[in-house]
Amino acid sequence: MTGRTLRLLSLLQTRREWSGSELADRLGVTVRTVRRDVDRLRDLGYPVDSVRGHAGGYRLAAGTDLPPLLLDDEEAVAIAVALRTAAGGLTGIEETALRALAKLEQVLPRRLRTRVAALQASVAGIAWEDRGPRADPVLLGALAVACRDHELLTFDYTTRGGAAAARRVEPRHLVASGALWYLLAHDTDKDDWRIFRLDRITGLTPTGHRVPARPVPGDDPAAFVAARLSAAPTRHRALATVRAPVDQVRAGTRNLGTRIRPIDESTCLVDASDDSLTRIAQTLAGLPADYTLDADPDVLSHLRTSAHHTLHATG
Protein backbone atom coordinates (compact mmCIF):
# COMPACT_ATOMS: atom_id res chain seq x y z
CA MET A 1 0.00 0.00 0.00
CA THR A 2 1.46 3.38 -1.03
CA GLY A 3 1.71 6.43 1.21
CA ARG A 4 -0.98 8.19 -0.84
CA THR A 5 -3.34 5.22 -0.46
CA LEU A 6 -2.78 5.23 3.29
CA ARG A 7 -3.54 8.95 3.34
CA LEU A 8 -6.75 8.28 1.39
CA LEU A 9 -7.76 5.60 3.89
CA SER A 10 -7.09 8.00 6.76
CA LEU A 11 -9.30 10.66 5.16
CA LEU A 12 -12.13 8.17 4.62
CA GLN A 13 -11.99 7.29 8.31
CA THR A 14 -12.35 10.89 9.51
CA ARG A 15 -15.69 11.69 7.84
CA ARG A 16 -18.80 9.80 6.85
CA GLU A 17 -18.66 10.92 3.23
CA TRP A 18 -16.25 12.64 0.83
CA SER A 19 -16.78 13.86 -2.73
CA GLY A 20 -14.25 12.75 -5.31
CA SER A 21 -13.14 16.34 -5.93
CA GLU A 22 -12.59 16.95 -2.20
CA LEU A 23 -10.37 13.89 -1.93
CA ALA A 24 -8.49 14.90 -5.07
CA ASP A 25 -7.82 18.38 -3.62
CA ARG A 26 -6.63 16.95 -0.29
CA LEU A 27 -4.31 14.45 -1.97
CA GLY A 28 -3.09 16.77 -4.74
CA VAL A 29 -4.11 14.37 -7.53
CA THR A 30 -6.82 14.06 -10.17
CA VAL A 31 -10.28 12.59 -9.60
CA ARG A 32 -9.28 9.71 -11.89
CA THR A 33 -6.32 8.91 -9.63
CA VAL A 34 -8.66 8.94 -6.61
CA ARG A 35 -10.87 6.37 -8.38
CA ARG A 36 -7.84 4.13 -9.01
CA ASP A 37 -6.72 4.42 -5.37
CA VAL A 38 -10.24 3.60 -4.17
CA ASP A 39 -10.20 0.50 -6.37
CA ARG A 40 -6.86 -0.45 -4.81
CA LEU A 41 -8.35 -0.16 -1.31
CA ARG A 42 -11.27 -2.36 -2.37
CA ASP A 43 -8.84 -4.95 -3.74
CA LEU A 44 -7.19 -4.99 -0.30
CA GLY A 45 -10.54 -5.64 1.34
CA TYR A 46 -11.52 -2.17 2.60
CA PRO A 47 -15.30 -1.62 2.19
CA VAL A 48 -15.40 1.69 0.28
CA ASP A 49 -18.88 2.50 -1.06
CA SER A 50 -19.59 4.88 -3.94
CA VAL A 51 -22.16 7.60 -3.25
CA ARG A 52 -24.46 8.65 -6.06
CA GLY A 53 -25.30 12.26 -6.68
CA HIS A 54 -24.34 15.34 -8.66
CA ALA A 55 -20.70 15.31 -7.55
CA GLY A 56 -20.43 11.66 -6.55
CA GLY A 57 -18.39 10.54 -3.61
CA TYR A 58 -17.11 7.80 -1.33
CA ARG A 59 -17.60 6.52 2.20
CA LEU A 60 -16.02 3.79 4.27
CA ALA A 61 -18.73 1.29 5.20
CA ALA A 62 -18.89 -1.46 7.79
CA GLY A 63 -17.67 -4.69 6.22
CA THR A 64 -18.50 -8.35 6.58
CA ASP A 65 -14.85 -8.99 7.40
CA LEU A 66 -12.09 -6.89 8.84
CA PRO A 67 -9.84 -5.47 6.10
CA PRO A 68 -6.57 -7.40 5.75
CA LEU A 69 -3.31 -5.86 6.93
CA LEU A 70 -5.21 -4.13 9.72
CA LEU A 71 -6.34 -6.17 12.77
CA ASP A 72 -7.52 -9.68 13.48
CA ASP A 73 -10.74 -10.23 15.44
CA GLU A 74 -9.11 -10.53 18.87
CA GLU A 75 -6.95 -7.44 18.33
CA ALA A 76 -9.95 -5.40 17.16
CA VAL A 77 -12.04 -6.35 20.21
CA ALA A 78 -9.13 -5.70 22.60
CA ILE A 79 -8.47 -2.26 21.13
CA ALA A 80 -12.15 -1.27 21.15
CA VAL A 81 -12.53 -2.23 24.82
CA ALA A 82 -9.25 -0.48 25.72
CA LEU A 83 -10.38 2.69 23.95
CA ARG A 84 -13.70 2.68 25.80
CA THR A 85 -11.83 2.28 29.09
CA ALA A 86 -9.44 5.10 28.23
CA ALA A 87 -12.32 7.35 27.23
CA GLY A 88 -13.88 6.89 30.65
CA GLY A 89 -10.93 7.13 32.99
CA LEU A 90 -7.55 8.37 31.74
CA THR A 91 -7.30 12.16 31.99
CA GLY A 92 -5.80 13.85 28.96
CA ILE A 93 -6.60 11.32 26.21
CA GLU A 94 -10.38 10.98 26.48
CA GLU A 95 -11.40 12.82 23.31
CA THR A 96 -8.56 11.26 21.30
CA ALA A 97 -9.68 7.80 22.46
CA LEU A 98 -13.26 8.55 21.43
CA ARG A 99 -12.22 9.71 17.96
CA ALA A 100 -10.15 6.55 17.49
CA LEU A 101 -13.04 4.42 18.77
CA ALA A 102 -15.47 6.09 16.36
CA LYS A 103 -13.15 5.23 13.45
CA LEU A 104 -12.72 1.62 14.59
CA GLU A 105 -16.42 0.93 15.26
CA GLN A 106 -17.30 2.36 11.84
CA VAL A 107 -15.67 -0.63 10.12
CA LEU A 108 -16.15 -3.35 12.74
CA PRO A 109 -18.25 -6.27 11.45
CA ARG A 110 -21.52 -6.79 13.30
CA ARG A 111 -20.28 -9.94 15.04
CA LEU A 112 -17.39 -7.98 16.61
CA ARG A 113 -19.54 -5.00 17.58
CA THR A 114 -21.76 -7.49 19.43
CA ARG A 115 -18.74 -8.92 21.28
CA VAL A 116 -17.50 -5.47 22.26
CA ALA A 117 -20.95 -4.52 23.58
CA ALA A 118 -21.16 -7.78 25.54
CA LEU A 119 -17.76 -7.21 27.13
CA GLN A 120 -18.71 -3.69 28.12
CA ALA A 121 -21.94 -4.93 29.69
CA SER A 122 -20.21 -7.75 31.57
CA VAL A 123 -17.10 -6.04 32.93
CA ALA A 124 -17.42 -3.76 35.96
CA GLY A 125 -14.83 -1.68 37.75
CA ILE A 126 -14.56 -0.98 41.46
CA ALA A 127 -15.23 2.66 42.36
CA TRP A 128 -12.94 3.51 45.28
CA GLU A 129 -14.31 7.03 45.64
CA ASP A 130 -17.38 9.08 44.79
CA ARG A 131 -16.64 10.53 41.39
CA GLY A 132 -19.90 12.43 41.14
CA PRO A 133 -22.08 12.44 38.00
CA ARG A 134 -20.72 10.42 35.07
CA ALA A 135 -21.47 10.83 31.40
CA ASP A 136 -23.30 8.09 29.51
CA PRO A 137 -20.77 6.29 27.23
CA VAL A 138 -23.39 6.05 24.47
CA LEU A 139 -23.93 9.82 24.67
CA LEU A 140 -20.16 10.38 24.63
CA GLY A 141 -19.81 8.32 21.48
CA ALA A 142 -22.70 10.04 19.71
CA LEU A 143 -21.33 13.49 20.55
CA ALA A 144 -17.82 12.51 19.43
CA VAL A 145 -19.18 11.49 16.01
CA ALA A 146 -21.24 14.70 15.74
CA CYS A 147 -18.17 16.81 16.59
CA ARG A 148 -16.17 14.95 13.96
CA ASP A 149 -18.85 15.37 11.28
CA HIS A 150 -19.88 18.94 12.27
CA GLU A 151 -23.51 17.81 12.47
CA LEU A 152 -26.16 20.02 14.05
CA LEU A 153 -27.75 18.51 17.17
CA THR A 154 -30.85 19.13 19.23
CA PHE A 155 -31.27 18.07 22.87
CA ASP A 156 -32.90 19.02 26.17
CA TYR A 157 -30.62 20.63 28.74
CA THR A 158 -31.20 21.06 32.47
CA THR A 159 -29.37 23.98 34.07
CA ARG A 160 -27.87 23.97 37.55
CA GLY A 161 -31.03 25.69 38.81
CA GLY A 162 -33.22 22.87 37.47
CA ALA A 163 -34.72 24.70 34.48
CA ALA A 164 -34.95 22.62 31.29
CA ALA A 165 -35.01 23.91 27.72
CA ALA A 166 -34.52 22.62 24.19
CA ARG A 167 -31.20 23.51 22.55
CA ARG A 168 -29.97 23.44 18.94
CA VAL A 169 -26.19 23.56 18.64
CA GLU A 170 -23.15 23.15 16.41
CA PRO A 171 -20.97 20.72 18.43
CA ARG A 172 -17.22 21.38 18.29
CA HIS A 173 -15.31 19.66 21.10
CA LEU A 174 -15.62 17.36 24.11
CA VAL A 175 -13.60 18.47 27.12
CA ALA A 176 -12.98 16.47 30.30
CA SER A 177 -12.35 18.16 33.65
CA GLY A 178 -11.74 15.68 36.44
CA ALA A 179 -14.80 13.41 36.56
CA LEU A 180 -17.00 15.76 34.53
CA TRP A 181 -17.42 15.97 30.76
CA TYR A 182 -18.43 19.11 28.87
CA LEU A 183 -19.60 19.76 25.32
CA LEU A 184 -18.32 22.99 23.77
CA ALA A 185 -20.82 24.06 21.13
CA HIS A 186 -22.19 27.11 19.36
CA ASP A 187 -25.84 27.65 20.31
CA THR A 188 -27.66 28.61 17.09
CA ASP A 189 -30.59 30.28 18.87
CA LYS A 190 -28.44 32.41 21.18
CA ASP A 191 -25.73 32.92 18.52
CA ASP A 192 -23.04 32.38 21.14
CA TRP A 193 -20.70 29.71 22.47
CA ARG A 194 -22.07 27.60 25.29
CA ILE A 195 -20.72 24.84 27.56
CA PHE A 196 -23.00 21.90 28.40
CA ARG A 197 -22.38 19.30 31.11
CA LEU A 198 -23.02 15.91 29.59
CA ASP A 199 -24.83 14.52 32.63
CA ARG A 200 -27.47 17.24 32.11
CA ILE A 201 -28.12 16.42 28.44
CA THR A 202 -31.12 14.28 27.49
CA GLY A 203 -33.03 13.53 24.31
CA LEU A 204 -30.06 13.92 21.97
CA THR A 205 -31.22 14.00 18.34
CA PRO A 206 -28.91 14.30 15.31
CA THR A 207 -30.45 16.46 12.59
CA GLY A 208 -28.51 15.04 9.64
CA HIS A 209 -27.56 18.62 8.70
CA ARG A 210 -23.84 19.40 8.55
CA VAL A 211 -22.27 22.84 8.71
CA PRO A 212 -18.75 24.19 8.18
CA ALA A 213 -16.53 23.89 11.25
CA ARG A 214 -16.80 27.12 13.26
CA PRO A 215 -13.41 28.21 14.72
CA VAL A 216 -13.24 28.14 18.52
CA PRO A 217 -12.23 31.49 20.09
CA GLY A 218 -8.53 31.36 20.91
CA ASP A 219 -8.10 28.04 19.02
CA ASP A 220 -7.77 26.16 22.35
CA PRO A 221 -11.03 24.41 23.36
CA ALA A 222 -9.73 23.24 26.76
CA ALA A 223 -8.47 26.70 27.72
CA PHE A 224 -11.72 28.30 26.55
CA VAL A 225 -13.83 25.90 28.63
CA ALA A 226 -11.55 26.34 31.67
CA ALA A 227 -11.87 30.13 31.47
CA ARG A 228 -15.67 29.96 31.17
CA LEU A 229 -15.96 27.54 34.08
CA SER A 230 -13.71 29.72 36.25
CA ALA A 231 -15.93 32.73 35.57
CA ALA A 232 -19.18 30.88 36.25
CA PRO A 233 -20.95 31.62 39.57
CA THR A 234 -20.65 29.01 42.31
CA ARG A 235 -22.66 28.28 45.46
CA HIS A 236 -19.73 28.62 47.91
CA ARG A 237 -16.92 31.22 47.71
CA ALA A 238 -13.38 30.36 48.82
CA LEU A 239 -10.28 32.39 47.86
CA ALA A 240 -6.87 31.28 49.16
CA THR A 241 -3.81 33.54 49.11
CA VAL A 242 -0.96 31.03 48.90
CA ARG A 243 2.59 31.84 50.02
CA ALA A 244 4.24 30.19 47.04
CA PRO A 245 5.04 31.10 43.41
CA VAL A 246 2.28 30.41 40.93
CA ASP A 247 4.34 27.79 39.03
CA GLN A 248 4.91 25.80 42.23
CA VAL A 249 1.21 25.80 43.06
CA ARG A 250 0.24 24.77 39.51
CA ALA A 251 2.74 21.91 39.62
CA GLY A 252 1.29 20.61 42.89
CA THR A 253 -2.42 20.79 42.02
CA ARG A 254 -4.76 19.34 39.40
CA ASN A 255 -7.64 20.71 37.33
CA LEU A 256 -7.36 24.31 38.58
CA GLY A 257 -6.08 25.87 35.34
CA THR A 258 -6.94 29.56 35.13
CA ARG A 259 -8.23 29.57 38.72
CA ILE A 260 -4.63 30.16 39.89
CA ARG A 261 -3.43 33.74 39.37
CA PRO A 262 -0.10 35.31 40.38
CA ILE A 263 -0.07 38.18 42.87
CA ASP A 264 3.71 38.68 42.91
CA GLU A 265 6.81 36.50 42.49
CA SER A 266 6.25 34.63 45.76
CA THR A 267 2.45 34.69 46.20
CA CYS A 268 -0.58 33.64 44.19
CA LEU A 269 -4.37 33.57 44.50
CA VAL A 270 -6.26 30.28 44.19
CA ASP A 271 -10.00 30.42 43.56
CA ALA A 272 -11.28 27.24 45.25
CA SER A 273 -14.94 28.28 45.00
CA ASP A 274 -17.28 25.42 44.18
CA ASP A 275 -20.81 24.09 44.54
CA SER A 276 -19.45 21.33 46.79
CA LEU A 277 -18.02 22.01 50.27
CA THR A 278 -16.19 18.68 50.10
CA ARG A 279 -14.42 19.60 46.86
CA ILE A 280 -13.39 22.96 48.34
CA ALA A 281 -11.82 21.15 51.29
CA GLN A 282 -10.03 18.75 48.94
CA THR A 283 -8.67 21.61 46.83
CA LEU A 284 -7.38 23.49 49.86
CA ALA A 285 -5.86 20.33 51.34
CA GLY A 286 -3.85 19.87 48.14
CA LEU A 287 -2.20 23.30 48.24
CA PRO A 288 1.59 22.89 48.58
CA ALA A 289 2.19 25.84 50.94
CA ASP A 290 0.64 27.89 53.77
CA TYR A 291 -2.21 30.19 52.85
CA THR A 292 -4.77 32.63 54.20
CA LEU A 293 -8.43 32.12 53.36
CA ASP A 294 -11.26 34.47 52.45
CA ALA A 295 -14.41 32.34 52.36
CA ASP A 296 -18.13 32.24 53.06
CA PRO A 297 -19.23 31.32 56.63
CA ASP A 298 -20.56 27.92 55.53
CA VAL A 299 -17.16 27.09 54.00
CA LEU A 300 -15.34 28.06 57.20
CA SER A 301 -17.79 26.05 59.30
CA HIS A 302 -17.31 22.96 57.13
CA LEU A 303 -13.52 23.26 57.31
CA ARG A 304 -13.56 23.67 61.11
CA THR A 305 -15.80 20.62 61.50
CA SER A 306 -13.58 18.54 59.22
CA ALA A 307 -10.45 19.67 61.07
CA HIS A 308 -12.06 18.83 64.45
CA HIS A 309 -12.91 15.29 63.26
CA THR A 310 -9.36 14.83 61.96
CA LEU A 311 -7.77 16.03 65.20
CA HIS A 312 -10.08 13.82 67.25
CA ALA A 313 -9.24 10.80 65.09
CA THR A 314 -5.49 11.37 65.52
CA GLY A 315 -5.71 11.75 69.30
Image (cartoon, grey):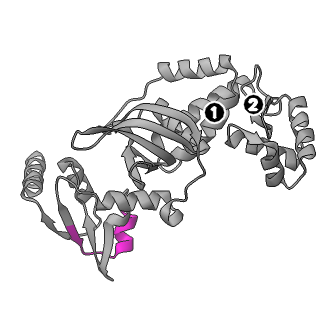
Q: Which residue is depicted at the point 91% across and 36% down? A: 40
- Secondary element type, mark 1: helix
Q: Which residues are magenta?
A: 240-253
Q: Amino acid at mark 1?
A: Ile
Q: Earlier in the sequence, mark 2 or mark 1?
A: 2
Whether residue 247 appears in magenta in the rendering, the answer is: yes
The residue drawn where x is 68% and y is 41% is 15
x, y percent for residue 63: 75, 23
Looking at the rendered structure, the secondary structure element under dot 2 is loop
Give how far across and how far down residue 280 sits, in percent: 22, 54
Q: Which residue is mark 2?
A: 71
Asked whether disc 2 touches disc 1, contact meaning CB atoms under 8 Å apart, the reply is yes
Q: Residue at x 71, y 23 (%)?
A: 73
Q: Position of residue 245 (x, y in %)?
A: 33, 76
From the viewer's perspective, tell me whether residue 299 is left or right of residue 258.
left
Residue wearing tag 1? 79
Q: Quadrant of residue 70?
A: top right
Whole-number angstrom distance, CA of label 2 to CA of label 1: 9 Å
Observer able to see residue 262 = yes
Category of crowding for the residue at label 2, using alpha-carbon neighbours closer than 10 angstroms: few (below 14), some (14–19), many (at least 20): few
Is residue 253 found left or right of 86 in the rendered image?
left
